[in-house]
Amino acid sequence: MASRAPFHWEDPLLLEDQLSEEERMIRDAARAYCQENLQTRVLEANRHEIFHREIMTEMGELGLLGPTIPEEYGGPGVNHVAYGLVAREVERVDSGYRSAMSVQSSLVMHPIFAYGSEEQRKKYLPKLATGEWVGCFGLTEPDHGSDPGGMKTRARKADGGFTLSGAKMWITNSPIADVFVVWGKDDDGVIRGFILEKGMKGLSAPKIEGKFSLRASITGEIVMDNVFVPEENMLPNVKGLGGPFGCLNKARYGIAWGAMGAAEFCWHAARQYTLDRKQFGRPLAANQLIQLKLANMQTEITLGLQGALQLGRMLDAGTAAPESISLMK
């Protein structure tokens, strides 16, 4: 008679066995960094609304920024599953840290790689990959959040380039950004992407203070007052909302994995608390209602991780539709 297979409560469907050796190594390196260097900062960051700028450089040194960007442009060139595993470990500590990483990777480096010229890729991607430069993504406006097609930012044609005027709101990383990927409408009303740089005349990025959530992530505005942007700073290979939406699809994938990391942290903490906390002479975990809640958490997280893994495999195979990414997120 065959022996009964053991049940692994922390990994019921054996996700670990479905990963390659390289994926596990990347995950382990990310976990070690996050637990040793982010977990130790997160209380101060949330209490005092601080984002430690050096985190971006540290992540860059480990290859955690733009993980899927090819090596020729400074990235590690790993697959989407590895990227997801990194996002999971970062958000296991804090959603704000994962947000900073996702913006740099999916909303700044990805559009430059996917929609930019070869010159733009060579100029910006290596320094973004190392964390020497921090990037931000300007799509949301004060009056146009869920309706980006109604944006008011304008890019007027000028001699040798464009002049951009408008404002973007709730922009992760903007107060510390060196590179700004901004979307605006040209003279024909077509949405185009532009790469702005810190120090351009008329460009400012004030910090938004007093947030109640994501306090470990720095958030601000992008204000453009007739900012001149050279012709060579326009992203040449995309027009319309498909450009920013393509970036958001990349980010949504990482968010799906990140949410799993946050959920795992909460589940493990709740489980341990109910085992340690005693009432009426026995642990809280001995009560059936508590057991049901923990089992429901375990079930949803286990299924979510399997879905995120499969979506990563689909992205690597080129078979993931945008709807699939939105469903998983």
Image (tube, rainbow, N blue to C red):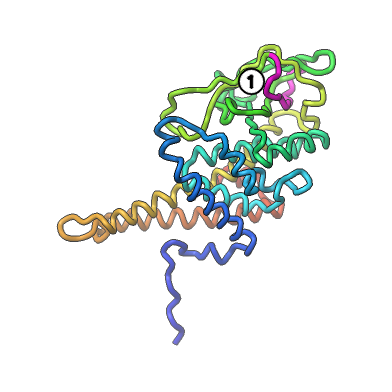
With respect to residue 125, does 35 lie above or below?
Answer: below
Instruction: Return the x and y of residue 81 as percentages of the image width and height.
Output: 62, 54
**Extreme left residue here?**
280
With respect to residue 27, does 154 lie above or below?
Answer: above
Q: Measuring 66% from the left and 54% from the top, which residue is drawn there?
A: 314
Q: Measuring 63% from the left and 63% from the top, which residue is drawn there?
A: 20
Instruction: Return the x and y of residue 237 as percentages of the image width and height.
Output: 80, 33
Image quarter in which the N terminus is found: bottom left
Mark 1 residue element: loop
Type of amino acid at the residue the image marks with label 1: Met
With respect to residue 138, does 105 lie above or below?
Answer: below
Image: magenta residue range: 188-201
Q: Residue 76 or 157: which is nearer the viewer?
A: 76
Q: Residue 141 or 188: which is nearer the viewer?
A: 141
With respect to residue 190, does 35 lie above or below?
Answer: below
Find disc 1 in the rendering and name its residue: 151
Q: Measuring 63% from the left and 20% from the top, which residue is drawn there?
A: 151
